[in-house]
Amino acid sequence: MSSDHLQQSSITTTTTTSTTITISSITKEISSEGDDHRLFDFPNPKRFKSSENGDDMSNNNNGIDAMDHTESGSHQNGFSNGNSNSMTNRTTTTTNQMTSTQVPVTPRDIDEGLYSRMLYVMGREAMQALSGSNVLISGMRGLGVEIAKNIVLGGVRSVVIHDCNSVTYADLSSQYFFTEADIGKNRAEASQKKLAELNNYVEVSYSSEELNAEYIQRKKINVFVLTEAVLDEQIKIGDYCHANNIKFVLADTKGLFGQIFCDFGEDFQVFDTTGENPIMQIVTEISNDNPGVVFLSADTRHGFEEGTYVTFSGVKGMTEVNGQEYKITVPSPYTFTIADTSAFGKYAGGGTVTEVKKPETMQFKSFSQSLSEPEMSICDFAKMYMPANLHLAFQALSAYRVKYNGLPKPWDDNDAEKFYELTKEINCKTPDKPITDELNKHVMHLFSKICTGDLCPIQAVIGGIAAQEVMKAVTGKFKPIKQFLYFDAIECLPENIFNPPSSDSTTTTTTTTTTTTSPTDVPSMKPVNKNSRYYSQTIVFGEEFQEKLAASKYFVVGSGAIGCEMLKNFAMMGIGCGKNGAIYVTDMDSIEKSNLNRQFLFRQWNIGQMKSKVAAEAIKQMNNTVNIQAFIERVDPETEKVYDDAFFEQLDGVVNALDNISARQYVDRRCVYYRKPLVDSGTLGTKASVQVVVPYLTESYSSTNDPPEPSVPMCTLRNFPFLIEHTIEWARDYFEGIFTNPVRLAQEYQKDQKAFSERLKKLTAYQKQEEINNVQRILGPDRPKSFPDCIKWARQIFQEQFHNTLVQLLFNFPRNQVTTKGERFWSGNKRCPHEIRFDPENKLHMDFIYAASTLCAEMYSIPPLKDRQEVKNYVSTIHIPEFKPRQGVTIHENDEQMKAHEIGGGSGENEAVELQQLLQKLPKLEDIANVQLKPLEFEKDDDTNFHIDFITATSNLRAENYEIDPADRSKTKQIAGRIIPAIATATAMVTGLVCLEVYKFLQQHKKIESYRNSFVNMALPFFGFSEPVPPKISKYLGNEFSLWDRFEVNGDMTVEELIEYFKKEHKIVITMLSAGMSVIYSPHFMRKKDKAQDMNKKISELYATVTKKEIPPHVHSLTLDMLCEDLEGVDVEDVPYIKYTFRQKK
């Protein structure tokens, strides 16, 4: 391969699920000169020669030292000044420390209690693959430890962390496992213990030895992750890994810029490219044609794409299609075609069709080849020029080090110009075919000025993505980055700096002209104190901005997975670390085992403790100057005494780390009211989103709402399920219907019979009958009094739910039932069921009996029987009478019929007589005084409480009734527990994006285009960034306003005074005044006497009178809404609300 020319034949852009730029036929000179500083002892690549004599690079190292912020010293993974050409001259030592957990030879069983949320992202097979993998991570500065943290939490078999250098002050701005006490210690050694604490299942060892092939083979490394290495070492390691089938991930950050490269070999199989569940639809008809047309439900679009492979199951009549795989053609959203079905049997009903996911083979080039022939994923579609520019910049940095024996000095215009000239030389090696025709001089200058900086949020973004790529490399789960990904966040700089100094900031390369602009000199950006833990951050932003960060006050709402990562980032950034600064965090939850897989501030010994308290203490250990106050009160209307006006008004901003919509909307409303910036973020598996809310610039979080998820009709759940999700939801409701709600009613009756009777009077006849029957069932004379009684009770409900109910259903609607339209009743989404006869030899049947009887015993405080064989022996002796279906039993076909039945009932005196008759059926209180009841509150994460066991058995039995494929315990737990799939990599990445927006808030950016909303799906991979949406603008009397505007009224006025004030100041006449649901003033609905009195009353007095509540002392303002007219009596339809401050703050 020639090294003298830089050639490019074409630039092509391909947009698919993942957009890639391909720059082909490029060769590049690699310069090698200076001292030989060796961290890795691998064979050198044969294809890359010196430009001077063509020798192998092993004879001519480029001498690029560790990336320090000065021109001397050490900053790479153990590079230092001076020669180290032989192993005998090496002064570093090698130490390997292991956690106490011994690593198995084969992939271990998955601890579902720990990994449950991640299991729903990766799947069991992928988790098994992870548990057998060995990962080496070289470089233990901020980026390396971020990747290592995510990988250890992910549950690999072993992680080797490698670094030959010592901790310096420059590391403290982003390496959160270092403190000042670690300065001078080996980076890997100082990190090992804290990384090992994250996951007892993962062996974490450290090494400071020179890595060589023998070491890699001995450790059986599957993935080599390289950070903080210079270009010639990247080439050396990358080519070695490619040749030896070791997956290679390169990750690097320079100030506000990041780079990732992946090489997973020349024949890498991706088994699941999206991570989405296979599409499954109900078949309604299949024609006997060539090709056969498959008809699906017309209620919703089927979602299948052209060329998808599908398989059928449960089809009756045309049984030939069952179990066969077909490639489909999609003529419409509700049908598709398969092969020739003309000779098949006639379709007779039933069946499902399911998407078949096909593996995809990907070819990766080595790092050296990719340097000259790069494929680059697009990260920001608003900056299509950026990947090629950064591809040049990261290479030019090594060339700069070689040429000038050091790195560009921070914010030095002369060095920036030299750097730019180097990028231009590299780009123009072949003038007619440059790498890019959009070389951006301004971006190159910025890269040079901040490349020696080190920012925790950038490393959180790059570290989260890189760690996910490692998991892809091991598992084949999700589609990898192909092959370079470049990321930047230059908008975090002051707006007058990151914006180009003129409209033309690019260098247009032609054969004759070059148009450029001059750099912007910003002396205030220059860093000062090299012995500050924030030195690497001040390189990027300057000391003055660091003081702003330290003095800022931020509120983190939630300290779960996102909250933990957010707090870590804040501590590294220095937010709230000054005399007047503070971080406030709240979370009302305590720590559970399942949290430990993502919420990395917590440890095994913290289980049961309050999240916010533990998280606050943990980040104090990371940065002891942080001022943090932890709350355990939720943020909602009931706690406005805690989070009052004074609390919110002091804040510089709020970040949400919440897991439910209603809480997010409430915090959003508070931020709009107090005009505070908010960043909301969330994750769903590998998906993540960020929404920025900036006062006056953007809409609020609540301005738009996602459409509600479609609900399942109750009659479908009760009588006509056709999906496993339906049977699981029914089983979850059934759990509460027999173990929770009736027991609460019975306790209420035991406690106060009179109050119980009074409450029943307000219910419909159907509801009264239902509640009394439940109490009678729980407390009646036939209630279980011993464990054998509990077994009998379980056997009876088995018979009732899985046999008798189905026999009755088929009695009402026989298999050959035809509707009034002449169509089969049991067709489409209605699956014809069958009853189940109990068999003690059937494991599923016994699973139900054992779980149900155990829960029944707990409900009645009866000691359980733990011997399943004894339970089996006893249940085999129980005789259940044969069920005979009855005439006149109503089974509702739809929810309208069901609601009509439930609403119906008597009224007046007859209803009162009926209630007394019903109450007489209940046992006397003296007969049940000693009955100890315990309502069972559903808890999904306790694997010993039989809750999920019961729901799994119940759901699968009902699925068997309706010939629906069953679900395993894990899937049942996810659906019944409404568990949101989560993974540490997405959490880390999204909080990095959030903190980049926080930088912008504190920079006080004024332009909406400076901010970014984000949507990322790392499985695809897809990265989408967009400007936030501006607020909706409304008008009244020619005045524009948005949700951020309001009328401000200070001082408590009478109604008359307030009306006159608005007439005079705003030219509008109030015709009605309300606060929430309470009307304070409405002349059209007031008697003259009342109106005259109320007009002279203070607004606060009227509010207290109307609401019948005293205004609490902490409330200083009321939010009032009004209807109004102009002075001519014409209605004014839309006006801002009124912030009515009636009480001055003390």
Image (cartoon, rainbow, N blue to C red):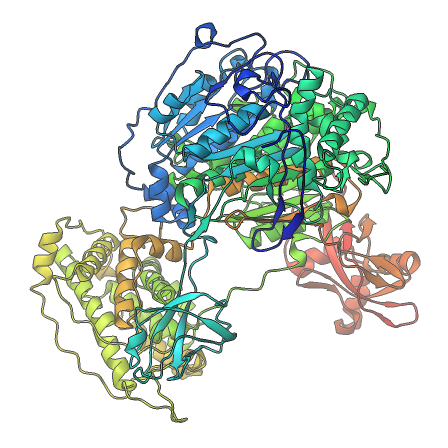
| Residue 631 visible from this viewpoint | no
Residue 134, position as x, y percentages in the image: 37, 32
Relative to 538, say whether 821 is above or below.
Answer: below
From the viewer's perspective, is 1035 left or right of 20? right
- Image point 52% across, 31% down: which residue? 146
Front in this rendered view, residue 771 or 41: 41
Q: Can residue 780 be seen in this view?
A: yes
Left/right placement of residue 816 relative to residue 829 reads left
Q: Which of 1036 and 341 is in front in this view?
A: 341
Residue 1065 x/y as whole percent: 91, 56
Residue 156 point in image, percent of width and height: 38, 35
Query: Foreground residue, 654 or 477?
Result: 477
Question: On the image, which quarter does residue 575 sit in?
Answer: top right
Vertical placement of 786 versus 250: above or below? below
Q: How many marks?
A: 0
Left or right for 465, reference 1054? left
Q: What residue appears at the point 28 percent right and 68 percent down from the top-left corner?
A: 958
Q: Where is residue 967 in the image (x, y as percent from the top left)?
A: 31, 59
